[in-house]
DNA sequence: TCCAATTTTAGATTTAGTCTAAGAATGTGG
DNA sequence: CCACATTCTTAGACTAAATCTAAAATTGGA
């Protein structure tokens, strides 16, 4: 029955990243809310409850969190990067019609083939992304908004 | 002995994409030169020999080429997308120190596991990207800066 | 408490990419 | 060949994404 606050404190302690109020708020929002948000979305949401939080700080915090492994970035062709609080290992599916990013269950790569391909390089991370049409778009129920950066309502004090 | 011109004509014919001088120039440059160039790099290079080629046209051409499968985009976290003339199937390695993108030999995914993870989604393409430290950076003799925006903030020897 | 290092901030700046509206090129059918 | 609709290209304005700056605030430790 650890609260989220304690959980995040442990996460910060584990990685050695200094836990500032801003970093905490950004990570807490990511953990609690929809994944794959853009920096701008995070800024707007967190800034609502913490008036004095600047865009630059969101970027700073996200960079720090990514570097320490608490957050994973997802690059999207021609659009703003998205961010994912990595609780569990998983892969991604990006719909090329609506731009939505969905989580896929983790599955392993053939380690031997991969190592052969990587040669002498030091591999820190493997990223697998499937591209295609999501089920909603396949059903024709598409809003055709490849750049879906409009508000999430609903935010709460941390 | 087909020249590059004939090869590209065939490629355009095969995909059904209209071959305009601008699209041809962009694709020809990609095929001939370094892969993984940004739209801006392509614009600057091609524009040198064809004074009347606009930035918008480079983007238009790249999008058309990507859509028809002659070029593949490579999204990079926090930096401009790069473009790759796809001659052969391969994967990518991105160095998180210098930002360089290197080609890796193709290897297959466990198709069964992948299909299970994808569920009902229509998968058009699979993208595998390894992240880590390239051999040059590992050796500490980095003088290249292929992705200048990746070397922001603190960068020591890389 | 004091201090140096780190972090945050607002706003300016740079970079990436799209959009617009007018003109040029293309191809098709006559 | 021409007429004409369609597609493509263009310059530059515009929007969006991300970084930079330098001053102020916060922090942890001595
Ligand atoms: Mn995810
Ligand atoms: Mn490549
Ligand atoms: Zn979709
Ligand atoms: Zn490197």
Image (cartoon, coloured by chain):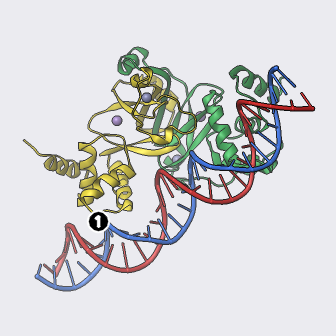
Chain colours: A green, B yellow, C red, D blue
Is residue A71 shown above or below B74? above
Is residue B89 shown above or below A48? above
Quadrant showing the C terminus of chain A: top right
Q: Where is residue B26 in the image (x, y as percent from the top left)?
A: 28, 52
Q: Where is residue A36 in the image (x, y as percent from the top left)?
A: 61, 40
Q: In the drawing, does residue B76 fall left or right of residue B44?
A: right
Q: Position of residue B100 (x, y in %)?
A: 41, 34
Q: What's the residue at 36%, 18% (across, down)?
A: A119
Q: What's the residue at 68%, 22% (across, down)?
A: A15
In the foreground, A134 or B10: B10
Q: In the drawing, does residue A96 fall left or right of residue B67?
A: right
Q: Where is residue C5 in the image (x, y as percent from the top left)?
A: 71, 30
Residue located beneath label 1 in the image: B52
Is label 1 within 8 A of ligand 2 (CB to nearest ligand atom)? no
Q: Mark 1 lies on which chain?
A: B
Q: Can residue B20 be seen in this view?
A: no
Mark 1, residues whose alpha carbon is within 10 Å: few (<14), some, or many (≥20)?
A: few
Q: In the drawing, does residue B116 fall left or right of residue A121?
A: right
Q: What's the residue at 42%, 18% (across, down)?
A: A110
**Residue A68 is drawn in which quadrant?**
top right
Q: In the drawing, does residue A70 fall left or right of residue A135?
A: right
Is residue B25 shown above or below B84? below
């Amino acid at each position: 029955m650890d609260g989220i606050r304690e959980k995040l404190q442990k996460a910060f302690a584990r990685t050695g990243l200094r836990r500032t109020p801003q970093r905490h708020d950004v990570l807490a929002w990511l953990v609690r809310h929809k994944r794959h948000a853009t920096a701008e979305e995070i800024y707007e949401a967190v800034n609502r409850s913490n008036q004095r939080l600047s865009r630059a700080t969101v970027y700073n915090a996200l960079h720090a969190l990514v570097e320490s492994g608490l957050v994973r970035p997802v690059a999207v062709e021609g659009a703003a990067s998205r961010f994912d609080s990595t609780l569990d290992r998983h892969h991604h599916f990006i719909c090329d019609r609506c731009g939505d990013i969905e989580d896929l269950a983790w599955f392993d790569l053939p380690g031997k083939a991969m190592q052969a391909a990587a040669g002498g390089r030091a591999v820190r991370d493997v990223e697998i992304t499937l591209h295609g049409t999501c089920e909603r778009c396949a059903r024709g129920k598409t809003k055709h908004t490849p750049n879906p950066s409009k508000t999430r309502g609903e935010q709460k004090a941390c």
